[in-house]
Image (cartoon, rainbow, N blue to C red):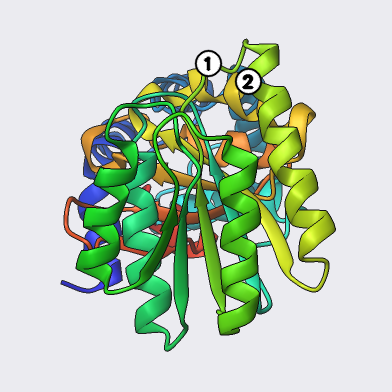
Amino acid sequence: MGLFSKIANSLKKTKDKISDTFARVFSIDRIGEEFYDELLDALISSDMSVTFAMDVVDNLREKMIEGSVKDKDYVKNALKSALISACSEVEEFDNEYPLVIMMVGVNGVGKTTTIGKLANYYKKQGKSVTLCAADTFRAAASDQLTEWATRADVRIIKHSEGADPSAVVYDAISSATAKKTDVLIIDTAGRLHVKANLMEELKKMSRVVEREYPDADFVKFIVLDATTGQNAASQVETFDEAIGIDGIVLTKLDGTAKGGFVTSMIAEKGVPVAFVGVGEKIDDIEKFNLDEFIDNLF
């Protein structure tokens, strides 16, 4: 199954909600205020923020000729253009090598699984990859990451449970630089975004990377469970304030009808989506493409 099909399947629940609105309105071949009201409700029900959805609908209204517009595809394309325009100020994620990715997020979002998928993704791009097991608090976290390292056929650096996470990061950097590794991916313990002391630990690990590996392209990815929709926005905001977030990785997109929140989050938080998980298998992760994503919302 190609990327187009995976994204389309993942967004089917969201797409069905919005498509129903178009189907109802165009059954009477007319666009009026009722249409805009129903469209606004559909966008909000897909979990776009209210303010963002209102701005998009107002943008669309300005583009439409008053009265009847019988070409449904014309209206859909205008809506897509409005969404793309709203997100266009945020640059899509790109990277250079050597690359260090620090993965952060709250508990239960699928962070370790996502790291395994990313390791496999970069390995298939012909890059050498090392994993760093800096989640030293969760029982058997390093064992779980080791399983993913084995599946992706990449190296892993780990310490014993309870070790200082920053020490693991230091050793992983030493190993990666000695081996001239292209990509180093750091796993961190899941944490509630309201816990200041745990945020300080992330800051410490960040300082280690910046000090010990200044030549690397160092990025921080937050992993978000797409089923939480707009509720994930506060996670992005808090982690961004603490360490600076460079990209978002979405998981469980195939299990939600709230896919619309992705567009409003990009526009309002100013952080690009870098990758999206589109299934359970190790190959089910793809680089995010905004145009394709929006195209599959309708």
Mark seen at residue 198: 2
Closest to the camera, between mark 1 and mark 2, is 2
Position of 256 with respect to 241 (left or right) is left
**How far is mark 1 from mark 2, CA to CA?**
8 Å
Choose top left, top right, bottom left or bottom right for residue 119: bottom left
Of label 1 and label 2, which has the lower sequence position? 1
Task: For the residues labelled 1 and 2, say whether their Cβ atoms are less than 8 Å apart.
Answer: yes
Query: Mark 2: few, some, or many residues within 10 Å (few <14, many ≥20)?
Result: some
Amino acid of disc 1: Leu
Position of 162 with respect to 267 (left or right) is left
> In front here: 227 or 95?
95
Of all residues, the one furthest to the bottom in this rendering is 126
Q: Position of residue 195 (x, y in %)?
A: 62, 11
> In front here: 130 or 291?
130
Mark seen at residue 192: 1
The residue at the point 50 percent across, 43 percent down is 134
Q: Quadrant of the N terminus?
A: bottom left
Mark 1 lies on a secondary structure that is loop
